[in-house]
Image (tube, rainbow, N blue to C red):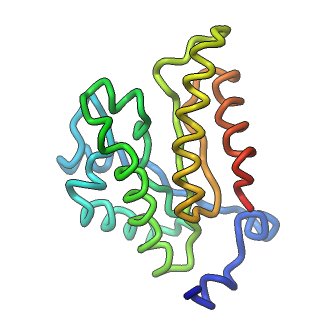
């Protein structure tokens, strides 16, 4: 059943027309500082291992004025998890991060954003790496859309051509709707 309050809440574009939209960020470093994320791999395992800590941080950001709960999926992509032997938890990590963000978003009328980031395997000008990276973006964006995010953030991408792959995946998924 759809929550009538959430259904009536303005989306990203309406909020942007009305003024600034704040999306607090910094989950990775805040959770590392608190001992929930290990320096080095920087994989958001905290969404599975310490969901209460992630929810607390979302609530802190909401109280600080964030209009958007950004799912903590920075580096939760296939290649990064493969490198540390945790690829089998990829989908669950992504979906759980979005669900945790949604819990807090619903408490305060905030939007929920999915998140994709630099791939660490992209080679500018290499069609094979572009295909692999695009497939990784498609995978993460697909889960985010399936979980009903309001929009998707593509962040910390060092190559314009890689950022365009992320944008193409987001646009292909028609997000925001």
Q: Is residue 63 left or right of residue 147?
A: left
| Residue at the top extreme, as displayed | 125
Residue furthest left as drawn: 35
Quarter of the image that includes the N terminus: bottom right
Q: Position of residue 138 (x, y in %)?
A: 59, 39
Instruction: Name the image quarter holding the C terminus.
Output: bottom right
Question: Which residue lies at the image location 43% right of the left edge and 41% below the top edge?
Answer: 74
Q: Residue at x 28, y 30 (%)?
A: 41
| Residue at figure coordinates x 53%, y 47% from the top left | 115
Residue at the limit of the structure toward the front, as seen here: 88
Residue 102 location, x and y as percent? 47, 70
Taking the image as shown, residue 96 lies to the left or right of residue 38, namely right
Nearest the viewer among 30 and 1 is 1
Q: Say if 121 sits above or below 9 in the image.
A: above
Left or right: 80, with 2 as reference point: left
Q: Nearer the viewer, residue 68 or 126?
A: 126
The residue at the far bottom in this view is 4
Rendered image quadrant of residue 51: bottom left
Count up the numbered dots: 0
Q: Position of residue 54 (x, y in %)?
A: 31, 60
Q: Residue at x 56, y 72 (%)?
A: 110
Residue 104 % position (x, y): 43, 73
Q: Quadrant of residue 28?
A: top left
């Amino acid at each position: 059943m759809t929550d009538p309050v959430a259904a009536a809440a303005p989306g990203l574009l309406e909020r942007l027309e009305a003024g600034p939209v704040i999306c607090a960020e910094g989950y990775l470093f805040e959770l590392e500082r608190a001992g929930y994320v290990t320096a080095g791999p920087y994989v958001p395992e905290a969404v599975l291992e310490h969901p209460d800590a992630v929810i607390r941080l979302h609530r802190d950001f909401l109280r600080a004025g964030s209009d958007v709960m950004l799912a903590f999926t920075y580096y939760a992509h296939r290649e990064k998890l493969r490198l540390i032997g945790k690829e089998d938890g990829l989908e669950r990590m992504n979906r759980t991060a979005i669900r945790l963000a949604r819990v807090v978003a619903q408490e305060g009328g905030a939007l929920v954003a999915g998140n994709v980031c630099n791939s660490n395997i992209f080679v500018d000008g290499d069609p094979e790496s572009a295909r692999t990276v695009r497939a990784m973006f498609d995978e993460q964006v697909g889960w985010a859309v399936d979980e009903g995010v309001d929009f998707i953030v593509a962040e910390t991408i060092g190559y314009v051509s890689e950022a365009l792959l992320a944008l193409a995946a987001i646009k292909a998924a028609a997000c925001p709707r």
